[in-house]
Amino acid sequence: MAPGLRAISLNMNYCMNKNLWLLLDSTDPADELLWLVFELQLAELRGERVHLLGHIPPGHVDCVRVWSDNFHRIVTRYSATITGQFYGHTHTDEFEVFYSEGRPVNVAYIAPAVTPYHGLNPAYRVYRAGDGGRVEDHQTHFLDLRAANARPGEAPAWQLLYDARSAYSLPSLAPESWHQLVTRLQANSSLFHTFYRHFYSASPVRPPCDPVCRRRLLCRLLSARSHSTEETCAGIHIQEEPGDGWWAALGHMLS
């Protein structure tokens, strides 16, 4: 790591709802969150910046609600110190925005996977960070499985799928930019279909996404606290454009 930047790796099994030991203590098993607060406070006092690394995104339904809520409080308190959060688990390309009193203050990046799980193309992501580890951009690369399987005797070729700032016209990767992107995704169907293609790593077998699917997906982007969608997603309003609909979505899926 660069001077003044530390990486903290979290054991996300302590929030996993399939971990039966959490029936004994789901608030802070093994005092991991208490330890995290100590580390973040120390970093703040030293003027350091922090990257958080984990497997299960804290807002995912697989994360226990009380643990997720406590984690959310910690992140919002130390949002100036935490300059990057990086997770996996879902195998899809997405993110979660953290809010404090209605203001976006942090972002959890959820990268796609190299496994073709549930009809996906394998994919990986490269982040570019600047001063203090602040994420400035990221690029996602994918492997076209259909093309690779058609040429079994050749080495598979990885391709650039998209560059975040260019693909979504983001002024920066600040939390406010991702918040504004979700707002735009509600009203701009063409932009949403671009996002949806990236979400499935350009897989040609991704299912069509009707307005219910679209709202559910955008809700995930705003839900950094698990099991709180009734609160966090109440303001989502999908605005379909003229000529958009089920058949248009199917056409975008096949393109």
Image (cartoon, helix red, strand yellow):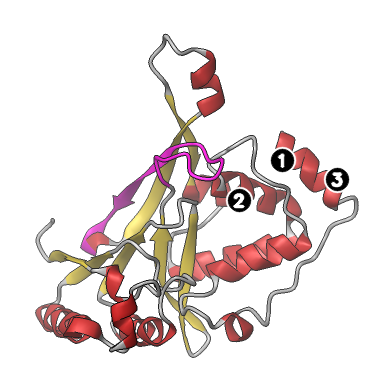
Give the magenta part as a residue range: 113-132
Looking at the image, residue 247 sits to the left or right of residue 193; the answer is right
Judged from the image, the secondary structure of the residue bearing numbered disc 2 is helix
Q: Where residue 203 sits: x, y (%)?
A: 59, 37
Question: Which mark is drawn over residue 253?
Answer: 1
Residue in view at x 67 percent, y 82 percent: 234
Inspect the image, locate mark 2, and give the three-letter code of the amino acid beneath it: Phe
Q: Is residue 125 magenta?
A: yes
Q: Where residue 129 sits: x, y (%)?
A: 29, 54
- Label 2, label 3: how far apart the Cα atoms are: 18 Å
Q: Where residue 187 sits: x, y (%)?
A: 74, 63
Question: Which mark is drawn over residue 195?
Answer: 2
- Label 1, label 2: how far apart the Cα atoms are: 11 Å
Q: Mark 1 Cα within 10 Å, few/some/many (few <14, many 20+)?
A: many
Question: Which mark is drawn over residue 247?
Answer: 3
Say which of marks 1 and 2 sits in front.
Answer: 1
